[in-house]
Image (tube, rainbow, N blue to C red):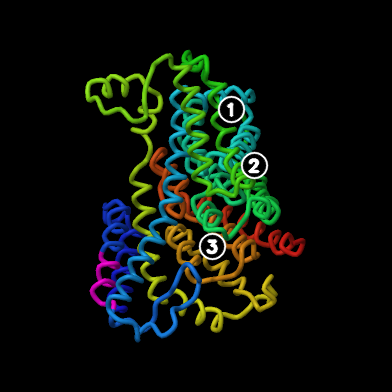
Amino acid sequence: METAIILVFVIGYLAITLEHSIKIDKLIPALVMMAISWALISLGIDSFPNWFDSANHALVENFPALGHEAKMHLMEETLLHHLGKTAEILVFLLGAMTIVEIIDYFDGFSTIKNFIKTKKKSKILWIFCCLAFVLSAIIDNLTATIVLISILQKIVKDRNVRIWYAGLIIIAANAGGAFSPIGDVTTTMLWIGKKVSTGHLFGYLLLPSLICMLVPTFIASFLPAFKGNLDVEKNTDDKPKSRFSGTMLYLGLGAIVFVPIFKMVTHLPPYVGMMLSLGVVAIFAEIYSSSKFSLTEYDGEESDAHANHSPVHHSLSKIELPSILFFLGILMAVAALESLGTLFNFADSLQTSVPMLGTEIHAGGHEGVSDLVVILLGIGSAVIDNVPLVAASLGMFHEPMDNELWHFIAYAAGTGGSMLIIGSAAGVVAMGMEKIDFFWYFKKISWLALVGFLAGTLVFFWTRTLF
């Protein structure tokens, strides 16, 4: 039965990886393999030799000797534990997405366009890459990419030039997302899972992430694509649609940045702070839009009327639910493998079979996971979605909070995806917005991403010695 579950996971994983080839949205195989995996566990609960207790991070002693009812009860408790941990991530993401959509409702991101005064291609490259790096740390790399490519489309009219900028924006956005607990889904998972803290993330990863962005941008600024000046056309619709656009931009970004501070002060889960931030932003959105609305409205006619005028209703209707469902499916599917002890056993075999790179001693005083394993995980995240890779690492490795391993995983998974355009959410959305060809990106941009990844890795080897 365990083999059947692993087979279901592998087939589902392949379907997710080949999403663009088979023309099936990745959320579908993620949800199907999650449901089938847990169904097979329930049906074959008496045949499994091990059971992993996620709450205690250890295998349950003498599991085969337990009665059927006791095993079923343990399975239900484990399922509820994983659902709770997954729900924390999903509710957090829902709040962040809604705040970003509220900013967009007031055309807040048009304020950023006013920063760009030059026509020189290389200067515009540096402006966009720095903006991508900073914005992705605040509003996540996916949203930062969407915002900046939307602005780029208004400034750069030649698509052949624009796709070069888009390629470098992907690298910069993924680098910026790696050092922030709210900058990338995988880093958020590690943060909410109490593997990394905000302070140590900045300490370990700010410099490596910065180098990962600066090196490719510096090299690219000498390429022919970024020589000379742009033909900038003046648009008549340059003015923001709302007079509150600047206010809502700074309020929304400030509300998202407030979340890690709220967590440090109260020690409550991050989604609580995100809901508070969403509530505050929604209050100002209501005042500025001069329309009354309620987040919970049961009167059909009144609700429809409110939906047409309420920024919050409008924003909630625009958030990307397929991504939320995909995370639910993949995290719960990985939880199924973790519960059987499969990932636990795999991690043990991995650590003994893969050679060490300069054998590092971790905080616990024992030999840590090979650097090579994490580097391969980073390169692998360019081919395979980084969310399941990080979810698997959460089940495989059990180093304490703020161990350098978790920070290296955050860096590798966050920035490694830039090496292929399908390797990150930022890359996939840029591919869709600009119709960027996979092989064009592979020939022109991938080598820059690889150089940045390796440069940042070398810097990380230095920064981790400081803690």
Q: Is residue 286 above or below residue 279?
A: above
Residue 263 percent location from the top left of the image: 59, 46
- The residue singled out by tag 2 in the image is 221
Say left or right for 72 vs 163: left
Residue 274 percent location from the top left of the image: 51, 40
Are dots 2 and 1 in contact, CB under 8 Å?
Answer: no
Looking at the image, which is closer to me, 87 or 252? 87
Say left or right for 137 vs 388: right
Q: Under tag 2, what secondary structure?
A: loop
Looking at the image, which is closer to me, 222 or 269? 269
Q: Image quarter for residue 307?
A: top left
Q: Under tag 3, what secondary structure?
A: helix
> What are the residue bounds of the magenta stretch?
36-45
Whether residue 218 is visible to the viewer of this picture, yes or no, is: yes
- The residue singled out by tag 3 in the image is 378
**Residue situated furthest right in the rendering:** 466
Q: Residue at x 42, y 76 (%)?
A: 341
Q: Residues within 10 Å of mark 1 (few under 14, many from 20)?
A: some
Q: Is residue 100 above or below residue 423?
A: above
Q: Is residue 411 above or below residue 97?
A: below
Q: Is residue 461 above or below residue 109?
A: below
The type of residue carrying mark 2 is Ser
Q: CA distance from mark 2 to mark 1?
A: 30 Å
Foreground mark, 3 or 1, reads 1
Q: Earlier in the sequence, mark 2 or mark 1?
A: 2
Q: CA distance from mark 3 to mark 1?
A: 33 Å
Magenta span has 451? no
Q: Earlier in the sequence, mark 3 or mark 2?
A: 2
The type of residue carrying mark 1 is Tyr
Q: Which mark is residue 250?
A: 1
